[in-house]
């Protein structure tokens, strides 16, 4: 059980990776990139978790009992990464719309074929 | 663990689906499930950002793109063997890499030994021993440690993030400004929505 979380995260990461490199459809590629990103976020958050810990929001100290807080630092970093991720997704989708307009297709191999023939 | 299995199932379904509309919807579900998982792992701030940005805005952006393009993926050969080999090799290497890692939830892991305890102590300590003269100290007044660290120590991250979002917004506008007027409703929303995500 100790490393199960990390392994599942790696499986997810590889599913996203496969989608990115093996699929020709550009929108599918963006979705795969999203899966990859989320799995990286999850890797960081898993590392910050402490068993029996609570969310890093201060609670009133009860008598003789100190609360254990999970590590807040990965949360801070990933908060930034999520927003950056959606910005890159937006840019990628805009590029796809543009490519569709120019080539009439969003399949990568068809586009490469057109480039070769021109 | 159930959530993790659901996540893997959703991800596999996404790559197998040919219908892009369904795939986009499933990616929204994927984000929502991962937000639930973030709550389980005590990352509540990350969870609501993921739910708002990942499940909300990203799905809307993808749907906007689908209206401009096609919703069907062209049937392709079932399996790309060279890609599969690369993926399996990478995955194996990563798994071997995790064998050295401390177990999940281990409080003695190296990540919990350096700056993080100091941040937490600062935040918690200010609360218990606070006097009236501590008012100029920002930490201690914010019960959410993630917010306190973000504002006190990680301001440059947010500045860099703003630069990225600005660049992306400008890029999206430049890319889509030449579209015919009938197809013009998604481009305007993109940068605005990306900027709205900063507050999350």
Image (cartoon, coloured by chain):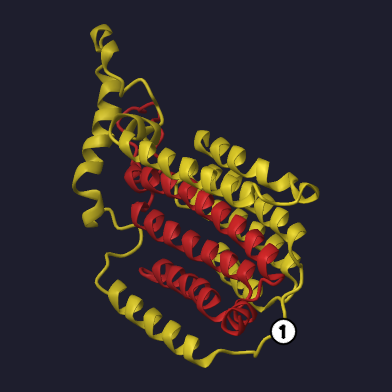
Chain colours: A red, B yellow
Q: Residue at x 31, y 22 (%)?
A: B140
Image location (x, y in percent) of residue A17: 48, 74
- Label 1 sits on residue: B75
- Is there any visible trace of residue A55 in the rendered image? no
Q: Is residue A62 above or below residue B1?
A: above
Question: Which quadrant: the N terminus of chain A?
Answer: bottom left
Q: Residue at x 61, y 84 (%)?
A: A117
Q: Residue farthest to the right?
A: B182
Image location (x, y in percent) of residue A25: 64, 74
Asked which secondary structure carries label 1, the reply is loop
Q: Residue farthest to the front?
A: A118
Q: Is residue B90 above or below residue B7?
A: below
Q: Nearer the viewer, residue A109 or B105?
A: A109
Task: Tell me if B121 is positioned left or right of A19 in this view.
Answer: left
Task: Tell me if B118 is positioned left or right of A54 in this view.
Answer: left
Image location (x, y in percent) of residue A87: 52, 49
């Amino acid at each position: 059980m100790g490393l199960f979380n990390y392994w599942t995260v790696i499986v997810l990461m590889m599913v996203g990776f496969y989608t990115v490199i093996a699929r020709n459809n550009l929108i599918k590629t963006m979705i795969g990139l999203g899966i990859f990103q989320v799995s990286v976020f999850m890797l960081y958050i898993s590392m910050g978790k402490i068993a029996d810990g609570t969310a890093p929001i201060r609670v009133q100290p009860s008598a003789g009992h100190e609360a254990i807080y999970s590590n807040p630092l990965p949360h801070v970093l990933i908060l930034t990464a999520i927003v950056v991720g959606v910005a890159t997704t937006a840019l990628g989708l805009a590029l796809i719309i543009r490519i569709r307009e120019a080539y009439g297709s969003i399949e990568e191999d068809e586009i490469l074929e057109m480039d070769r023939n021109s | 663990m159930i959530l993790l299995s659901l996540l893997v199932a959703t991800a596999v379904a996404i790559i197998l689906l040919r219908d892009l509309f369904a795939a986009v919807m499933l990616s929204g579900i994927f984000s929502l499930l991962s937000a639930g998982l973030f709550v389980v792992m005590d990352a509540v701030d990350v969870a609501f950002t993921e739910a708002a940005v990942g499940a909300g805005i990203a799905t809307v952006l993808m749907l906007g793109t689908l209206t401009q393009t096609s919703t069907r993926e062209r049937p392709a050969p079932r399996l790309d063997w060279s890609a599969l080999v690369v993926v399996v090799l990478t995955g194996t290497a990563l798994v071997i890499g995790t064998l050295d890692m401390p177990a999940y939830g281990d409080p003695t892991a190296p990540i919990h030994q350096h700056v993080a305890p100091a941040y937490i102590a600062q935040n918690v300590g200010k609360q218990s021993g606070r006097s009236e003269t501590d008012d100029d100290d920002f930490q201690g007044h914010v019960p959410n440690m993630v917010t306190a660290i973000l504002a006190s120590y990680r301001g440059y991250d947010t500045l860099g993030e703003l630069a990225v979002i600005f660049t992306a917004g400008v890029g999206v506008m430049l890319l889509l400004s030449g579209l015919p007027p009938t197809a013009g409703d998604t481009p305007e929303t993109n940068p605005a929505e990306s900027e709205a995500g900063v507050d999350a």
